[in-house]
Amino acid sequence: MNKPNLDHPTLPLVKQHFADVKFVATEFRGQTTLIVPAAKMHDVMRFLRDDPACAYDMLSDVTGVDYLNYPAQKGAAAGRFAVVYNLVSTTHNRRLFVKVMLSPSRDTSGVEDDPALHVPSVTDLWAGAEWTEREVFDMFGIRFDAHPDLRRILLWEAYPAHPLRKDYPLQGRGEREDYRVIERDSA
């Protein structure tokens, strides 16, 4: 097994600036991911954007991951859900993934607000995060505190669940049974 190549030039800068924070860094197929505690996420993201040696001026994407029934993770990398930020420095021609792990504190089969599934919004740092954070909220139920317009973006407001959670049934929960079938002759 090859040893991970964690020589990404941003990692020592982050560790030096946040000496009291425990980070986990991983590398897969040449892509580096920095796992950040949720409490420090916004500070780290601001540093990554504002520090001239980092200069991550573009947020390419924000997405969510549900690790339900995934092999056990340990330490800072533990958690059922992840919010993943794809950052790009156009100045230094670098890419860095920043991941925040979250563990729910209650049943996740519904739409109830879980205080453990909150992270700070980065819309104040990258305005383009507004729509992608809304999509993660809509599909996974992760809420972004201080988001200017956090509401569903793909599904209707009264939709009874977050369908990209792995505990959501593949056939749905009766949503399809309520649709009127339109036959070819009557269309």
Image (cartoon, grey):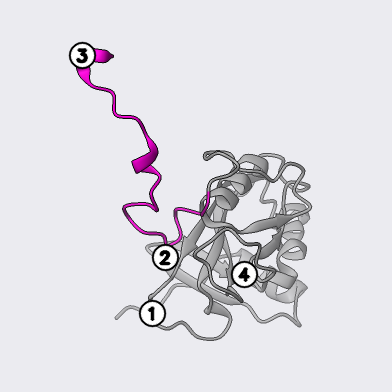
Q: Are marks 4 and 3 in contact (CB under 8 Å)?
A: no
Which circle's residue, 2 or 3, is located before the other in the chain? 2
User: Label 4 neighbourhood size at 10 Å, few (<14), some (14-19), many (20+)?
Assistant: some
Please state which of residues 118 and 30 is positioned toward the viewer in this rendering.
118
Q: Are marks 3 and 1 in contact (CB under 8 Å)?
A: no
Residue that badge 2 annotates: 167
Q: In 3D space, how far apart are the residues under numbered discs 1 and 2 (Cα atoms)?
A: 34 Å
Which circle's residue, 4 or 1, is located before the other in the chain? 1
User: Label 3 neighbourhood size at 10 Å, few (<14), some (14-19), many (20+)?
Assistant: few
Please state which of residues 159 and 117 is positioned toward the viewer in this rendering.
159
Quarter containing the N terminus: bottom left
Residue that badge 3 annotates: 185
Magenta span has 167? yes
Q: In 3D space, how far apart are the residues under numbered discs 2 and 3 (Cα atoms)?
A: 38 Å
Instruction: Judge whether 111 appears above or below 116 on screen.
Output: above
Residue that badge 1 annotates: 3
83 left or right of 57? Answer: left
The image position of residue 165, as x and y in percent, is 46, 60
What segment carries the magenta color? 160-187
Query: Looking at the rendering, which quadrant does residue 141 occupy?
Result: bottom right
**Residue at horizontal 29%, vertical 29%?**
181
161 left or right of 51? Answer: left
Please state which of residues 2 and 124 is positioned toward the viewer in this rendering.
124
Q: Are marks 1 and 2 in contact (CB under 8 Å)?
A: no
Q: In 3D space, how far apart are the residues under numbered discs 4 and 1 (Cα atoms)?
A: 17 Å
Q: Are marks 2 and 4 in contact (CB under 8 Å)?
A: no
Tell which tag, 1 or 2, sits nearer the viewer. Answer: 2
**Residue at horizontal 42%, vertical 65%?**
167
Tell which tag, 3 or 1, sits nearer the viewer. Answer: 3
Residue that badge 4 annotates: 11
